[in-house]
Image (cartoon, rainbow, N blue to C red):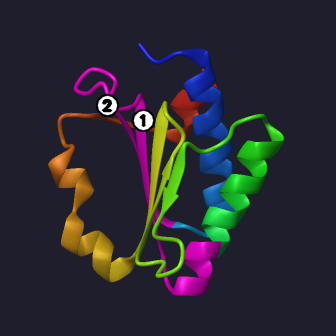
Amino acid sequence: MVAGKSKEMARIIAASLEEKKARDMKILDISDVSVLADYFIIASGSNRNQVQAMADDLEEKLGQAGFTPRQVEGYQTANWILMDYQDIIIHIFDEENRLFYDLERIWRDGNLVEKVDLEA
């Protein structure tokens, strides 16, 4: 069972990614299969600028809500930006790298979460 703080963060992230027109956003609840985090959130952008804009918006909105990242990797190249917020790890890919790394397949034991389920 995922704690309330993680759900609140996931709601903020999902709304921000939708606002920035993220493609194929997936929210995976990995709390039952890993101690790494409660959620992996995976999304794609069509180009480097969009990928960076999504990361910028996420950092701003999560910061306003009092959440700071433990680590952010890959911002400069923007092929795959990984944002580690302890309970949630966000992966923002360009489309080519998302297909190549296929995290959804690797983490298929996690449960796919619909955005509406975060509201409950």
In what element is the residue under mark 2?
A: loop
Dot 2 amino acid type: Ile
Q: Are marks 1 and 2 in contact (CB under 8 Å)?
A: yes
CA gap, disc 1 and disc 2: 5 Å
The image position of residue 61, as x and y in percent, is 76, 49
- Please give the name of the residue rendered at 30% of the width and 76% of the height, measured from the top-left corner: 97
Q: Residue 120 versus residue 8: which sits nearer the camera?
A: 8
> With 107 as the anchor, is 24 left or right in this view?
right
- When asked about the image quadrant of residue 39, the answer is top left
- When asked about the image quadrant of residue 30, the answer is top left
For label 2, count other residues whose C-alpha is less than 10 Å away and answer few (under 14), some (14-19) or many (20+).
Answer: many
- When asked about the image quadrant of residue 34, the answer is top left
The quadrant of the picture occupied by the N terminus is top left
26 inside magenta stretch: yes
According to the picture, the residue beneath numbered tag 1 turns out to be 39
**Segment tinted magenta in the rendering:** 23-52
- Please give the name of the residue rendered at 69% of the width and 54% of the height, measured from the top-left corner: 59
The image position of residue 96, as x and y in percent, is 30, 82
The image position of residue 107, as x and y in percent, is 21, 44
According to the picture, the residue beneath numbered tag 2 turns out to be 30
- Please give the name of the residue rendered at 68% of the width and 42% of the height, measured from the top-left corner: 12
Dot 1 amino acid type: Tyr
